[in-house]
Amino acid sequence: MTPRRNRVRRFFDLDALLDALATPRGTALMLSLLVALAASSVIQIRNAASRVAEAEAMFRGPGVREAAVSLADMQRLAQLIAAAGEDGRLAPSERAAIGGALDMLYVRNVNLQMIAARGDPTGGGAMAIAWLSDIVDEVDAAMATADDSLPPLQTAADGTLVSARSAITRWLEELHAAQTTALRAALGSMERLTRIHAGFLGLIVAAGGGLILLLRREVLIRRTRNEAERRAWHIAYHDTLTGLPNRTSFAEMAGTVFPPRPGAAPVALACIDLDGFRAINDGHGQAAGDDVLRHVGQALARLAAREGLFIARIGGDEFAAILPATGAAGLASLGRRIGAAIDRPVPAANASIRACASIGIAEAAQVARLAAAGPDTMVRAAQFALARARDDDGAGALRLFDPEIARAFARRRERLEALGRAAATGELEVWFMPKVTLATGALAGFEALARWRHQGTLVLPEEFVSLAEENGQIAGLDSFMLREAARAMADWNRRHGTALGVSVNLSPQRLGQPGLVAEVEAALAASGLPAPLLTLELTESAAVHDWATAMRLLTALRALGCRISLDDFGTGYSSLAYLRTLPADEVKLDKSFLTDLTEAESARRIVAAVVEIARSLGLDVVAEGVETAAQARIAATLGCAIGQGFRFGRPRPAADPWPDPADGSSWRAEQGAAADPTTATLGRASA
Amino acid sequence: MCSFRAAALIAAAVIFGAWPALAQEEGPFRRVDLPPIEHAEATLRVVAPDGTATVYTPEQLEEVGTWALTTATPWEDEVRFEGVLLADLLARHGLAGVGVEVIAENDYVTRIPPDPQVTGALLVATRADGHSIGRRERGPIYFVAPADRVGPDRPVQLNHLVWMAAEIRPGP
């Protein structure tokens, strides 16, 4: 906006004016103004009308008429007198006629007197009346005295009749002039009023025009607002990339459909997950990934329109469809149609990519046999079927939530619920796996491992840790392990008079959540374990998504005095970048390196290089999965300080009696003594 | 039966008792019998549509049937006028429903429309307050009407109140 327009805007702010007028005071003011205008108009019209009425009354009044007729009456009298007495004498019939005419004139004069007495606008009436009275008096007198001689009568009439005629004529002229003046004044007043009202009319037209413009403006504003609201609504409920309804929209729709109301048509939910989408993103770039998503979105939108389905994008490469449940065969057919719609080559970037999806479909009626088929349960059931489809058939798989899957789903649900209570019911246990100094064979510390004793069997960590991660219970599990491992280690050290450290695994999810540092601090304080004896193990892939948060957290943990260990080192994508950036104290070589160590020269060289780099950065190197004496020897030769594996001992409950830590040979003797057959295949046991 | 007879008797008494009274009232006019008096010398000539003329003296006029009207006029305060109904006079000469002209002694002509609102409101007065109307009192024959029916927006106009009336004849 230019400065000039700014000034105009400051000077005349239409919105501010309208706002002011819309207040109760503003509205009252406007109404008062209108009422005042209307009242003033009414008063003026009434005044003008009364002026016109006054002028009209002057014409209508009997004065003019009586005066005019009196002229005729005088003329008649004069004629009668002139015609009388042809023989010089006044005949009786002539006397009667003159008397009658004089009577007429008399009454006329009385009338004029009465009219003048009511108001004479000119003042000329008095003279005319006086002359008429003179005529009557003189002719009466002449008639009384003259008997039948004419000259006195004629003399009496002549002079006064002429004078009376002049007086009355003059009076009539004056009356005419007065009437004209009054009429002109009334017309002038009407003219003024007309001009004023023309002005009012102009104002009203202008105000009406203004109102129409305001109305138009309001309508335009309302349309713009509605459009903006519509767009905002669309943005809020649609995915911008694919144009499909988004997760919010899906949640609302699913909330109305699931669980189905009694009598409602049977419905099902399909979860659709693109196969290998991450590989597409990594291999062809994110633009290509977006192209694939756009293609899939368009294909699904067309299918939804054609088949009357509701399909939404609920995650990165995840879609969900609400389908009519037409039995297992019908749903499978529909699922295949969805798969076929997606399964097309997509021209993306510089390549043609084949999009492919795995689909899991859950029918509400099937799910309802296990639990209330609410939106969340339905999604979990469909995703469960999807996961099974992938596990069983790989990419492009389709699986219905059938009774077999339903049983597995129910078992998983039961385990989920039990896991939620496990810490409280004492089903969770802390086990220790020894770490040994390779050079001397002396005990160097332990890695704490979680075990869940559920319904008489020990559940494998791979199973329940992933379960806990998926359902948000991992924080509770981590907290339990931190607390109990620290306490168990402190007890152990007290019992054996040692100062050994313990490693506790941190779930990747915990890195993004607040409160971890305070929890570690609390665990150390409660157990009395010195901070340097607590090592927190972080899986290499964990922090990759959010470097900044991971850095802050690890720095804070080190500031407490704890050690940081990078677990499974060598399996991720960015091991060396990791090493350079993260504030770590130790790396744990992945056991896959150890497996080939004795046979493959290349493995040996890699380990040698990694150990060299780690040591040059001041990090300790721990070899995992040491199962044989040969592996232990080679690892030690290559520079690994610490070893961990079945060669030195299997995991066992932390509270069990342990061999004397001072006897290094006893750790080697552990080999082959399977203390815990269920963990024999665990390899990397983690919490 | 007894009550029916009583009701019939009461009804008859009301109808026959009220009839003369109804006949004695005609709007603002009241039927009157006047004692003979001496009138000023005057005549009213009535010309029928066929051209036959009848000349009335005030005395002869009063034989048509006299009515009284008490009213003010533009020239007098309240006066009890007596005379004949114009409507009776017109009917008598076949002038009812015919527009007529009334001519005063000075040949002044007034047109009276054949409107019962007008003709029915006019009394051809021959007496005022019990005496004959003198020549200098707008008599002897004076057309008057109830004041509430006279005015610019009313049936009877000021010029219909003819004084010194001399003739009634069919209009042109």
Image (cartoon, rainbow, N blue to C red):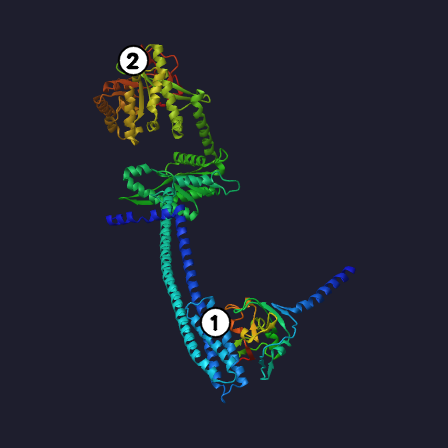
Displayed quadrant of residue A335: top left
Above or below, A156 relative to A505: below
Q: Is B38 placed left or right of A538 in the picture?
A: right
Q: Is residue B106 visible?
A: no
For disc 1, the marked residue is A112
Residue that extends furthest to the left in the rendered view of this protein: A616
Mark 1, other Cα within 10 Å: few <14 / some 14–19 / many ≥20: many
Rendered location of residue B165, percent (x, y): 55, 77
The residue that appears at 50% across and 34% down in the rendered structure is A369
In front of the other: A615 or A247? A247
Rendered location of residue A573, percent (x, y): 27, 31
Q: Is residue A583 visible?
A: yes
Residue that extends furthest to the bottom in the rendered view of this protein: A87
In front of the other: B13 or A13? B13
Q: Which mark is residue A442?
A: 2
In front of the other: A81 or A296? A81
Q: Are marks 2 and 1 on the same chain?
A: yes
Judged by depth in the image, the label closer to the viewer, 2 or 1, is: 1
How many labels, in total?
2
Q: Is B27 placed left or right of A231 in the picture?
A: right
- Quadrant placement of the N terminus of chain B: bottom right
Q: For numbered disc 2, what is the local secondary structure?
A: loop
Q: Which mark is residue A190?
A: none
